[in-house]
Amino acid sequence: MASASAALLRRYLMALRKNPVDGFSAGLVDDDNVYEWEVTIFGPQDSLYEGGFLKGRLSFPQEFPLRPPTFKFTTEMWHPNVYKDGRLCISILHEGEDQYGHEDAGERWLPVHTIESIILSIISMLSADVPDTSSPANVDAAKQVREDFEGYKKRVRRLARKSAEEAWD
């Protein structure tokens, strides 16, 4: 199984190198490990993250694509769907049944998802005018969205600027 998943990940990587997708870049953290990817998401235009360089790690299990990867931002983030340690919480990366009833089965992990569909889902989350606060990973960020949206926007824009400055260091 591991060799099949490694071969699939190599194909995805070659396809992304051959035909880059607007909005992000991706590559291996270490050439000897196809299961760990470094991703840079370019802050989506007309979003609070515009101009930012948001870095993260995409970690694939050996059972990929039967099981989803995990994504963790290494850039400091402030978003209701990003845990304080950077781990991302979005439906597309959740497997199995939703025991809490927040997500439809069609929103959760399916083996047909690609690297591109995963990253585009993250970009879509970041592009939302108002983040979803219904099932937050970061309760404090969700609370600020609901109670002080202007303060939330200011904090996110400041972090996006900081990520751009750090990208040039």
Image: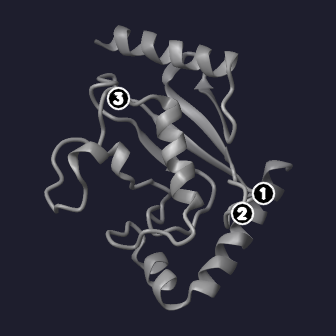
Q: Amino acid at mark 2?
A: Ala
Q: Amino acid at mark 3?
A: Pro
* Disc assigned to residue 79: none
**Residue bearing the label numbered 3:** 61
Dividing the picture into quadrants, the one containing residue 165 is bottom right
Circle 2/circle 1 CB separation < 8 Å: yes
134 vs 123, left or right, is left
Is residue 100 visible from the viewing direction of this image? yes
Residue pictured at 37% horizontal, 16% vertical: 5
Q: CA distance from mark 3 to mark 2?
A: 30 Å
Q: Which element carries disc 1, helix, strand or loop?
A: loop
Q: Residues within 10 Å of mark 1 (few under 14, many from 20)?
A: some
Q: Residues within 10 Å of mark 3 (few under 14, many from 20)?
A: some
The picture places residue 105, in percent across and down from the top left corner, at 21, 46
- Residue nearer the viewer, 86 or 158: 158
Residue pictured at 57% horizontal, 85% vertical: 149
Which of labels 1 and 3 is toward the front? 1
Which of labels 2 and 1 is toward the front? 1
**Residue bearing the label numbered 2:** 160
Q: Which element carries disc 2, helix, strand or loop?
A: helix
Dividing the picture into quadrants, the one containing residue 6 is top left
- Ranked by sequence position, the earlier of labels 3 and 2 is 3
Q: Residue most toward the right?
A: 168
Residue pictured at 27% horizontal, 26% vertical: 66
The picture places residue 65, in percent across and down from the top left corner, at 33, 24
The picture places residue 108, in percent across and down from the top left corner, at 29, 44
Q: CA distance from mark 1 to mark 3?
A: 31 Å
**Residue bearing the label numbered 1:** 51
- Residue nearer the viewer, 55 or 154: 154
- Residue nearer the viewer, 73 or 127: 127
